[in-house]
Image: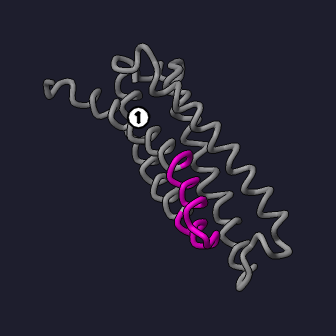
Amino acid sequence: MTVRNLPRHLAALSAALWVGGMWAVGYLAVPVLFQALPDRQLAGMLAGKMFTAMAYIGIGCALYLLAYQWHRFGRSVWKQKLFSVTFAMLILLLIGQFAIQPIMANLKAQALPLDVMQSALAAQFKTLHGLASILYLLQSLLGIALVINPHAPKNI
């Protein structure tokens, strides 16, 4: 590995960290939390903290990847599929983290001392949770395209 290749290697590591982290948290750690912990409120709180941490990691990785691709391709970056994938993943992440999650947190706070799922706000929370889950799934699937790309080391 030469210093000249360091930005490309950092881009590959950023993609792996972001996508691998999303899959590990969303499809492994969080389901285990809800299965293992008897207190669903605690499991939900811990899951929320993990999703938030992963969101900030994702934002950092996405910004690096976009900057790297912009530097590599210049104005023609908009024609690059991996740039579009990275940009779409970032938009989905931002919508989930800064639009949907605050509303869900507000619903949880309004429901106290009850668990939101035991309150009159349960239907609204379920709808938002479903929407957040769909956005996360789309982001996860796009992540596959970002990581499993035959040209990823050169074009990421």
Q: Secondary structure at mark 1?
A: helix
Q: Which residue is painted at 56% across and 67% down in the image? A: 37
In this picture, residue 74 sits left or right of residue 138: left
Assess whether residue 146 is covered by the magenta stretch.
Answer: no
Q: Residues within 10 Å of mark 1 (few under 14, many from 20)?
A: many
Split into 4 quadrants, where in the image is the C terminus?
top left
| Residue located at (41% from left, 28% from top) | 70
Q: What residue is shown at x 15% (from left), y 24% (from top)?
A: 1
Instruction: Note whether 46 is above or below 76 in the view shown.
Output: below
Depicted 35 relative to depicted 15: above or below: below
**Which of these two is toward me, 100 or 138?**
138
**Where, by quadrant of the figure, is residue 20 drawn?**
top left
- What residue lies at 61% left-to-right and 73% top-to-bottom? 39
Please state the total of marks drawn on the protein image: 1
Colouring style = one colour
Q: What residue range appears in magenta?
A: 26-46
Place of residue 7 in the rendered image (x, y in percent of width and height, measured from the top left): 26, 31
Q: Residue furthest top?
A: 150
Q: Position of residue 16 (x, y in %)?
A: 39, 35
Question: Which residue is nearer to you in this view: 6 or 42?
Answer: 42
From the image, give the main secondary structure of the stretch colored magenta: helix
92 in relation to 33, above or below? above
Farthest left residue in view:
2
Q: Which residue is mark 1?
A: 15
Looking at the picture, which amino acid does disc 1 mark?
Ala
